[in-house]
Image (cartoon, helix red, strand yellow):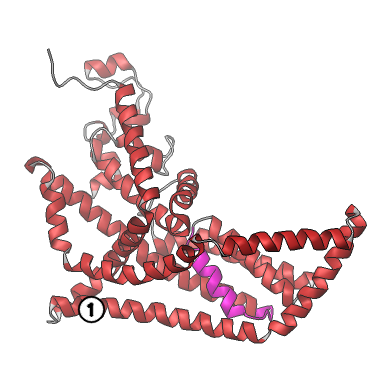
């Protein structure tokens, strides 16, 4: 009896689905631990070249890590101070904004009474009930966790980042020795690919965010919109959440602009600015700045963002794309998982230069000969599977 017979498809599918379910449950239940650790991992990979630069010029490792982390903290603090200054200016205009809101509120009450025959007293009762429910929600015991949770995450991320950089070699060695000796080279190759993808993705993401912030702010300044820099920077930060962030940023900008500039031409101009920036971002900035290493199709990206949001909120949405990119690297290089890599990728069968998508004469293939008229007859990729795969051509 052959003990190495392949597992039935239903058995492999069941084990795969079970593993996915366990991982998702672990992320959902342990998100307070997993999310800060994952964010720190991305930051550690991003800061690794800077740490290496300090080490090469003779600075000790411990001090190099501290300096790299300090630079990152200073940059984040500078952005936070910029946003805080804009928010302070926003608060100075609060009386004017309150007056505009009151005018809009009275107009809305009249419209509701005229269109739906709901009296002012009934509307006041509805608002009173909504306010009481809102107060009960904020006075609940879970409110403290909602407020202190992000603060705890902000404290943990620098600590985790420092420790991940300091114990990097030990963690890599641990990952390698988990596998058999003959798999060592493949494991090192996968780790190197993951590191390269995450570094290029994070650096490109920072450059893209800066460019989007500048374009948004410039467009809003041309329209003479108040708080243009604040809205432009916040929209760029929200744009870090793929697909959904851009829509939320546009809605937020329109709402804030409507309070101080209710003119329809200004509102349409704001929408036009954000649409134009999104077109530039999707067609020029992302392909040329972020790069083409994160090759994930749009369907998987959207589903991944939604799943990440359901599991870990806004942080899960941000982490979804790099996590899927790492999964694709692993799937493409582990025997038996290649179909999942194809599912995550952005190549359609018509685009892929691969024998997997060619219709050939099965009898001829079984005999070792290509089918008549099959391009594989003259294609070197037929003898060398790596010849038609750009990713495999670059493997060492």
Is 293 left, or right, of 247 in this rendering? left
Seen from the viewer's position, the closer of residues 89 and 355 is: 89
Q: Which residues are magenta?
A: 222-241
Is 115 left, or right, of 350 in this rendering? right
Camera sees residue 196: yes
Instruction: Give the structural element (helix, strand or loop) at label 1.
Output: helix
For the residue carrying disc 1, how many other residues have a C-alpha within 10 Å: few (<14), some (14-19), or many (20+)?
Answer: some
The answer to whether residue 30 is magenta is no
Q: Measured along the vertical axis of the image, is residue 30 above or below residue 24?
A: below
Residue drawn at 69 percent across, 78 percent down: 223
The answer to whether residue 234 is magenta is yes
Residue drawn at 46 percent across, 73 percent down: 210
Quadrant of the rendered structure where residue 93 is?
bottom right
Quadrant of the rendered structure where residue 20 is?
top left
Residue drawn at 27 percent across, 44 percent down: 330
Quadrant of the rendered structure where residue 328 is?
top left
Q: Which residue in the rendered view is the most extreme toward the left?
A: 181
Q: Residue 108: image x %, image y %?
A: 83, 64
Residue drawn at 85 percent across, 64 percent down: 109
Residue behind mark 1: 66
Seen from the viewer's position, the closer of residues 26 and 280 is: 26
Seen from the viewer's position, the closer of residues 371 and 22 is: 22
């Amino acid at each position: 009896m052959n003990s190495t017979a392949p597992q039935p498809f239903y058995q492999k599918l069941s084990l795969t689905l079970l593993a996915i379910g366990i991982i998702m449950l672990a992320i959902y239940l342990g998100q307070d631990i997993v999310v800060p650790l994952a964010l720190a991992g991305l930051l550690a990979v991003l800061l690794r070249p800077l740490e290496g630069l300090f080490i090469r010029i003779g600075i000790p490792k411990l001090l190099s890590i501290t300096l790299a982390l300090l630079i990152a903290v200073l940059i984040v603090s500078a952005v936070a101070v910029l946003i805080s200054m804009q928010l302070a200016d926003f608060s100075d205009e609060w009386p004017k904004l309150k007056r505009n809101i009151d005018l809009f509120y009275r107009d809305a009450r009249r419209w509701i009474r005229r269109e739906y025959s709901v009296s002012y007293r009934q509307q006041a009762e509805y608002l009173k009930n909504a306010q009481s429910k809102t107060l009960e929600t904020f006075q609940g015991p879970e409110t403290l966790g909602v407020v202190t949770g992000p603060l705890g995450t902000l404290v943990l991320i620098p600590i985790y980042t420092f420790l991940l950089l300091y114990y990097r070699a030990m963690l890599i060695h641990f990952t390698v020795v988990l596998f058999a000796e003959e798999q060592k080279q493949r494991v090192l190759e996968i780790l190197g690919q993951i590191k390269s993808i995450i570094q290029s993705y994070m650096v490109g993401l920072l450059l893209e965010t800066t460019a989007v912030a500048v374009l948004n702010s410039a467009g809003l300044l041309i329209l003479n919109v108040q708080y243009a820099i604040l809205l432009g920077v916040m929209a760029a930060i929200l744009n870090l959440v793929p697909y959904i962030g851009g829509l939320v940023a546009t809605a937020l900008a329109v709402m804030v602009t409507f309070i101080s500039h209710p003119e329809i031409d200004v509102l349409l101009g704001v929408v036009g600015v954000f649409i134009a920036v999104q077109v530039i971002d999707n067609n020029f900035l992302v392909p040329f700045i972020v790069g083409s290493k994160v090759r994930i199709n749009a369907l998987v990206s959207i589903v991944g963002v939604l799943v990440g949001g359901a599991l870990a909120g806004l942080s899960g949405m941000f982490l979804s794309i790099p996590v899927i990119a790492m999964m694709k690297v692993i799937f493409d290089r582990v025997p038996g998982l290649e179909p999942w890599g194809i599912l995550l990728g952005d190549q359609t069968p018509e685009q892929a230069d691969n024998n997997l998508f060619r219709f050939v004469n099965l009898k001829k293939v079984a005999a070792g000969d290509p089918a008549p008229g099959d391009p594989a007859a003259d294609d070197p990729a037929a003898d060398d599977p790596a010849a038609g795969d750009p990713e495999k051509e670059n493997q060492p």
